[in-house]
Image (cartoon, helix red, strand yellow):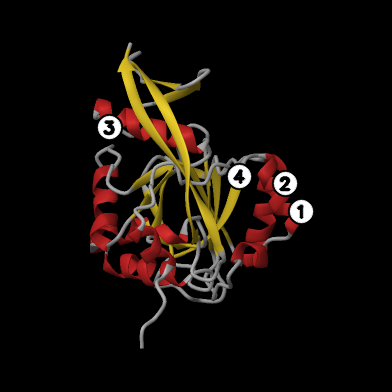
């Protein structure tokens, strides 16, 4: 029997651009350990709408996470909050009820508790939310199960990140970079690079929390400069008909932003077809 193509197969067939497709509203992430079975909208299931709204006021996007081998119903639950200075704050709640109280406190204050441990070590989230989209279940599960053993402590399953059609969808914290990893070897490469302070350019979709055009411009500038250090900063500023990318050393690039629309295609395996909107960045010159 012939099965209809998946959203990922369709995106690959039309060569949908990757750059500029990371979530634009997620400038900070709150990771909430939730081990039991996930529904299609697990964050909504465990968090009331008013709490989610309060988090959004602080620019925080909540996401469920779990270790791939841990399915116990309750017990100590980890929480992580990405910081504006490029670090992750981590702390433990004794059980899910206490965890939910901690989440409410973060929603009210926008900060982690004083007792949280702050780290700049890499953590890679992989979307495996199969109830949301089959592509994430298939590709995400293969990544989680197939990474090298020494990377497994840094790999966590997560709920929906955005962009099922680019599965496997990964988020590199604390730097907020979304990538498409097509295999466990790709995820290994992301972590291998991160552990020596480098961003893996292959499959890179963009940095979350900034406009799509700025995501694409940052990637284009890094490619021109071959500057993939995670501690380097690429600032993007808008001009009348272009953007300017500036690095830590004062180098600048003028970058033209091209936008367009392609044929309608499904953004998920169960969704309706929607027009493809894409953005491309073209470096003009140095100054």
Q: Residue at horizontal 27%, vertical 32%?
A: 223
Q: Label 3, label 1: how many angstroms apart (C-alpha)?
A: 41 Å
Q: Which residue is mark 2?
A: 54
Q: In 3D space, how far apart are the residues under numbered discs 2 and 1 (Cα atoms)?
A: 6 Å
Task: Give the residue displayed 50% in from the left and 60% down from the top.
Answer: 267
Residue at the extreme front of the image, as rendered: 263
Seen at 59% across and 40% down, the residue is 114
Left or right: 230, with 206 as reference point: left
Q: Quadrant of the N terminus?
A: bottom left
Q: CA distance from mark 1 to mark 4?
A: 13 Å
Position of 66 relative to 242 (above/below): below
Question: From the viewer's perspective, is the residue at label 3 or at label 2 nearer?
Answer: 3
* Residue position for label 1: 50
Residue 241 tag number:
none
Label 1 packing within 10 angstroms: few (<14), some (14-19), many (20+): few
Q: Label 3: which residue? A: 223
Image quadrant in which you'd find residue 96: bottom right
In screen coordinates, is 161 left or right of 178? Answer: right
**Is 155 above or below relative to 252?**
below
Q: Are marks 2 and 1 in contact (CB under 8 Å)?
A: yes
First-in-chain label (3 vs 1): 1
Residue behind mark 4:
60
Is 186 drawn above or below residue 96 in the view shown?
above
Q: Check disc 3 and report its element: helix, strand or loop.
A: helix
Residue 126 % position (x, y):
41, 60
Q: Going from the N terminus, do you reach mark 3 or mark 4 first?
A: 4
Quadrant assignment, res 193: top left
């Amino acid at each position: 029997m012939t099965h209809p193509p998946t959203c990922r197969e369709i995106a690959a067939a039309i060569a949908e651009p990757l750059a500029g497709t990371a979530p634009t509203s997620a400038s900070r992430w709150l990771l909430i350990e939730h081990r039991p079975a996930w529904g299609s909208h697990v964050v909504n299931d465990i968090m009331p709408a008013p709490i989610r709204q309060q988090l959004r006021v602080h620019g925080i996007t909540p996401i469920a996470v779990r270790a791939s081998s841990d399915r116990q119903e309750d017990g100590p639950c980890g929480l992580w909050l990405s910081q504006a200075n490029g670090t992750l704050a981590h702390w433990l709640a004794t059980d899910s009820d206490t965890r939910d109280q901690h989440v409410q406190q973060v929603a009210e204050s926008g900060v982690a508790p004083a007792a949280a441990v702050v780290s700049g070590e890499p953590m890679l989230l992989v979307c495996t939310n199969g109830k949301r989209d089959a592509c994430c279940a298939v590709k995400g599960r293969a990544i989680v199960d197939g990474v090298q053993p020494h990377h497994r402590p840094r790999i966590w399953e997560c709920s929906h990140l955005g962009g099922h059609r680019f599965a496997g969808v990964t988020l590199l914290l604390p730097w907020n970079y979304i990538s498409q990893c097509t295999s466990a070897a790709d995820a290994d490469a992301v972590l291998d690079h991160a552990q020596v302070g480098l961003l893996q350019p292959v499959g890179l979709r963009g940095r979350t929390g900034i406009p799509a055009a700025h995501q694409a411009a940052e990637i284009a500038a890094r490619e021109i400069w071959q500057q993939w250090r995670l501690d380097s900063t690429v600032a993007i500023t808008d001009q009348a008909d272009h953007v300017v990318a500036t690095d830590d050393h004062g180098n600048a690039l003028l970058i033209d932003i091209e936008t367009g629309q392609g044929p309608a295609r499904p953004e998920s395996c169960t969704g309706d077809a929607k027009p493809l909107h894409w953005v491309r960045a073209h470096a003009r010159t140095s100054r």
